[in-house]
Image (cartoon, grey):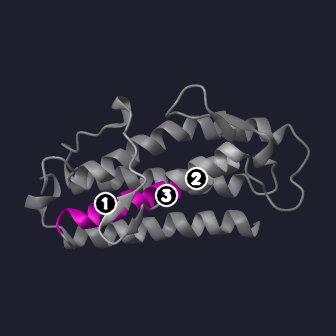
Amino acid sequence: MKKQLAQIVAALDHAERRLESIAVGTPDDRWSRRNDSERWSVAECVAHLNITSEAYVPLMRKALEEARQLPPANAEYKRVFLGWLFGSLVGPMLTIGKIRLGRVKTPPNFVPTGDMPKNVILAEFKRLQMEISRMVKEGDGLALDKVLITSPFGGKIQYDCYSALVMIPRHQERHLDQAEEVWGS
């Protein structure tokens, strides 16, 4: 497998292990409860990641089908500018002291409820991780950077499939940071 894709699979695995640790460290009575009315609960952070992954899966399936019709990938994958930009914006938030930079308003259809049981939210996260990881592996050797997808967040923005695959674990790390901050764990 190309090194760039192996790094994505490793990042997805890392996010899954990190969530398992957060879940173990978060008592059930705090899982769905907000510590601050202006911030999401742990459950809402994870539910948001599930909503996001669920939105990307069909786009990536379609992109894989399109990439199978193209000549094989050459050297390293390259992200289009918008893919690089959005990949930078959705990753872990930069902080200067206690000031957090890079907050983005979540579109309404990606705002979670977090009202499902802990085991259901966790099982869904794991299922989606396996599915995305499988698609990354299927994409090995395909020209993933030559196939564009339309962002599920803003119906007109397009970037390459490889960029989307890079974004997913970066976005997960951002919200896992947020989940850890809920109760200071």
Q: Earlier in the sequence, mark 1 or mark 3?
A: 3
Q: Position of residue 168 (x, y in %)?
A: 53, 53
Local crowd at mark 3 within 10 Å, few (<14), some, or many (≥20)? some
Q: Which residue is mark 1?
A: 178
Local crowd at mark 1 within 10 Å, few (<14), some, or many (≥20)? many
Magenta residues, as a range?
A: 168-183
Q: Which residue is mark 3?
A: 91
Amino acid of disc 3: Gly
Q: CA distance from mark 1 to mark 3?
A: 12 Å
Q: Which residue is mark 2?
A: 87
Q: Position of residue 45 (x, y in %)?
A: 30, 52
Placement of 43 over or under 20, stated as above or below: above
Labels 3 and 2 touching (C-beta < 8 A): yes
The image quadrant where one finds the N terminus is bottom right
Q: Residue furthest left?
A: 29
The image quadrant where one finds the C terminus is bottom left
Q: CA distance from mark 1 to mark 2?
A: 18 Å
Res. 10 in view: yes
**Mark 3 secondary-structure assignment:** loop
Q: Residue at x 82, y 56 (%)?
A: 141
Q: Residue at x 18, y 67 (%)?
A: 26
Taking depth in this image into account, of 165 and 38 the one nearest to the observer is: 38
Local crowd at mark 2 within 10 Å, few (<14), some, or many (≥20)? many
Amino acid of disc 2: Gly
Q: Residue at x 11, y 60 (%)?
A: 30
Please state if 113 lies on the left or on the right of 7 as rendered.
Answer: left
Res. 62 in view: no
- Please identify the dominant SS of the magenta region: helix
Amino acid of disc 1: Gln
